Amino acid sequence: MQTIYTLTLLLFCTLTFAQTDRAINKIRKAVEQINKDTGYTTKTLDNEQFLEHMTDGGGKLTGYFKNGKLVKIVEWVGFSFCVNISEYYLKDNKLIFAYTQGSQFSYVDSLAGFDYDKLALTMECRYYFENGKMIKSILNGSTMCSGKPSDSWAKQYQDECLRYLKLLKAK
């Protein structure tokens, strides 16, 4: 009996991982296709049109539309010592993938300040979504602005994407 239970559990786990891998591959192909396409209509919002809290470096939100449907959103937000760029990929108005790069300006002791000509990538986050749920995340690094990424950020990405979708469609 124990052997049957163990084999059933192993089979279930294997099938679950295989389904997740197939979903991730499907998402990657969709993202690749969106990035390859060049025939988009764009709408852009400046920082005061989309940021709930102004930053010292400002911000910009760009929506990419194909045949009237929003398929990609790029958010650029600047801080005094960091820059975050987030990309949201949509299918049928639902978030399927979110990617963020966090970069920091180098601090120069001799200047007692930041070198705004040198920006170093210090954080990358990838979140994969299926049917409104995060199915996988890949999180690396951190920034002074955002800290260390976590799976709990997935909900924030979903909420922001929905808000940005409404703002960009209304423009």
Image (spheres, grey):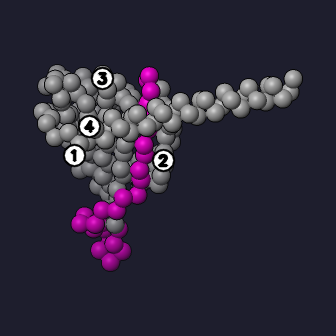
Residue 70 lies, in percent from the top left, at 23, 27
Three-letter amino acid code at the position of disc 4: Ile
* Above or below 144: residue 14: above
**Tag 4: Cα neighbours inside 10 Å, few (<14), some, or many (≥20)?**
some
Of badges 3 and 2, nearer the viewer stands 3
Instruction: Identify residue for label 2.
Output: 139
Q: In the rendered structure, does residue 124 fall within the stretch colored magenta?
A: yes
Three-letter amino acid code at the position of disc 1:
Gly
User: Could you classify mark 2 by the number of other residues whose Cα lies within 10 Å: few (under 14), some (14-19), or many (20 or more)?
Assistant: some
Which is in the foreground here, disc 1 or disc 4? 4
Check disc 2 and give the amino acid type.
Leu
Q: Mark 3 points at which residue?
A: 93
Distance from disc 1 to disc 4, alpha carbons, whole Å, reads 27 Å
Q: Which of marks 1 and 2 is in front?
A: 2
Distance between mark 3 and mark 1 Cα atoms: 27 Å
Name which of mark 1 and mark 4 comes first in the sequence: 4
Q: Magenta residues?
A: 107-132
